[in-house]
Amino acid sequence: DAMVIQNPRYQVTQFGKPVTLSCSQTLNHNVMYWYQQKSSQAPKLLFHYYDKDFNNEADTPDNFQSRRPNTSFCFLDIRSPGLGDAAMYLCATSRDLGEGGGYTFGSGTRLTVV
Amino acid sequence: GDSVTQMEGPVTLSEEAFLTINCTYTATGYPSLFWYVQYPGEGLQLLLKATKADDKGSNKGFEATYRKETTSFHLEKGSVQVSDSAVYFCALHSGNTPLVFGKGTRLSVIA
């Protein structure tokens, strides 16, 4: 089945230690998104890629970076995680922009910062 | 910017009860509206959508009508089942912008 896979499901990292979360897709979708979801809050868009074109949300902290080396993979790098970065990180894809009904989500990576 | 407001959860219902989860939105232009559902341990998945005023989206017994006059898109189901227990997210987008989500409402249905 075509899908979006996030690894790992659970990640524990130390305060200030760089961490990378990964997302892969077999759908060949053009757009990949990273959302941050904290407890009882709305998923918040961090950035998205349209193909190789990177789009950063204005309020995404500089601590968060992303890479998309090819169509299938997208990475979220947190350079110096703080306690406030503990959250669920959701990766999603869509074939094109403006296809709100066509998002496919991974199961998420829950990040704990100790 | 665009935003979505959902009723606070959790919502706990008995099986076969009627469900309403309220959702209102603020947006420039004419957004498309969505309900996504997240079952335990799984990713969000589309439940239903409506792309213009007065459209009704429906799926799996759930319905929601796009009400432009009240800027609302309330989710309803006439008779919930235990298998409907999940977190429900109202969302919107305008044009080519990414989805904007509400906080989610957790529904628990007990037998």
Image (cartoon, rainbow, N blue to C red):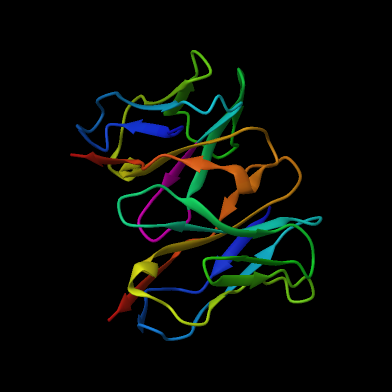
Horizontal and vertical percent position of residue A26: 47, 26
| A38 up-or-down from B76: above or below | above
Horizontal and vertical percent position of residue B101: 55, 55
Residue B94 versus residue A102: which sits nearer the camera? A102
Residue at image position (73%, 49%) is B94
**In the picture, which quadrant includes the C terminus of chain A?**
top left
Horizontal and vertical percent position of residue A66: 47, 23
**In the picture, which quadrant includes the N terminus of chain A?**
top left
Residue B99 in sight: yes
| B51 up-or-down from A83: above or below | below
Q: In the figure, residue A108 lies in which quadrant? A: top left
- Residue A82 lies within the magenta run: no
Residue at image position (38%, 75%) is B81
Horizontal and vertical percent position of residue A82: 30, 37
Q: In the figure, residue B38 lies in which quadrant? A: bottom left
Horizontal arrangement in the rendering, residue A86 relative to residue A104 (left or right): left
Horizontal arrangement in the rendering, residue A68 relative to residue B31 (left or right): left
Q: Which residues are magenta?
A: A34-42
Residue at image position (35%, 56%) is A39
Residue B81 versus residue A69: which sits nearer the camera? B81
